[in-house]
Amino acid sequence: MKKRYKLFGLIIGLGILSACGKDVDDGSAVEVLPLEVELTVTEQAEVGDTVNMEALVTYGDEKVVDADKVVYEVWEEGKKDDSVMIESVNEKDGTYTAETSFDHDGLFHIQVHVDAKNLHTMPVKQVTIGEGAQVGDSEPSESHDHGHAEGFALHFVKPENAVAGKETEMMTHLEIDGQPLEKADVRYEVSSDVLGEKHLWIDADEVKPGEYNAVHLFEEAGTYTVKIHVKNEEGLHEHEEFTFDVK
């Protein structure tokens, strides 16, 4: 009789271990897939012509028909701080479209900002209108003061409703070749007339792949300039400059 009880207990124990093993295996099968965006734009057009924009969004082999946000940002070469945001139309087949036009010759940039599946990506394309950009046509941009490494993209989310005496969040998305740029060293250099000759250096933390945030309490109202410095171990060294207001 004792042998029967021992055998019965052994069978129960093995069953419990087997069930636990199945739970672990099921949990380890979760796979994180890449968010891909194929951006297509009219690359050459004349003044007044319609410039079409289309972004095909996929997650692995699946077309994403319910992206959280797809917005196009358009700016002229050397004038990124004056960029215009254009909402897209969800065609319900994985593509998100929009259109625009330009009233003068020049070189323009179109960048699509996509949020889906808790991921963010932002590929960019160039558009030449008429004869394109001519030497001396535009003043140097505060946000493009040097040439970028190939495939590098930076998007600074300007603080909205920043108020003196309260913490303000500064957020930057970085990409390289259409993928989040991870493990970069990102610092915000902040200056303003209200600070005099003093510059603030604020380190940003990578809160998720390619997204770098910092929080700072601005003591005085005014217009602030933030220069975003980006470095990594592969020798990348980039920076862009933006302005925002603190009320």
Image (cartoon, helix red, strand yellow):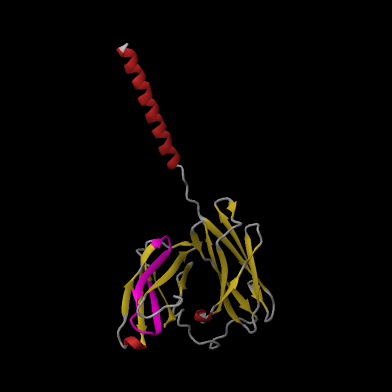
Taking the spot 31% from the left edge, 76% from the top edge, the residue there is: 201
**Main SS of residues in magenta:** strand
Quarter of the figure with residue 162: bottom left
Taking the spot 34% from the left edge, 21% from the top edge, the residue there is: 9
Image quadrant containing the N terminus: top left
Q: Classify 12 as above or below 85.
A: above
- Compared across the picture, whether 85 is left or right of 51 comes to left
Please, which residue is most extreme toward the top here? 1
Image quadrant containing the C terminus: bottom left
* Residue 184 in view here: no
Q: Classify 155 as above or below 224.
A: above
Foreground: 41 or 156? 156
Residue 17 place in picture, x, y as percent? 37, 30
- Compared across the picture, whether 229 is left or right of 176 comes to left
Taking the spot 45% from the left edge, 82% from the top edge, the residue there is: 142
- Point out the stretch of residues depicted in magenta: 207-229
Taking the spot 37% from the left edge, 24% from the top edge, the residue there is: 12
Residue 30 magenta = no
* Residue 62 in view here: yes
Residue 182 place in picture, x, y as percent? 40, 61
Residue 211 magenta = yes
Foreground: 46 or 63? 63
Residue 25 place in picture, x, y as percent? 43, 38
Quarter of the figure with residue 46: bottom right
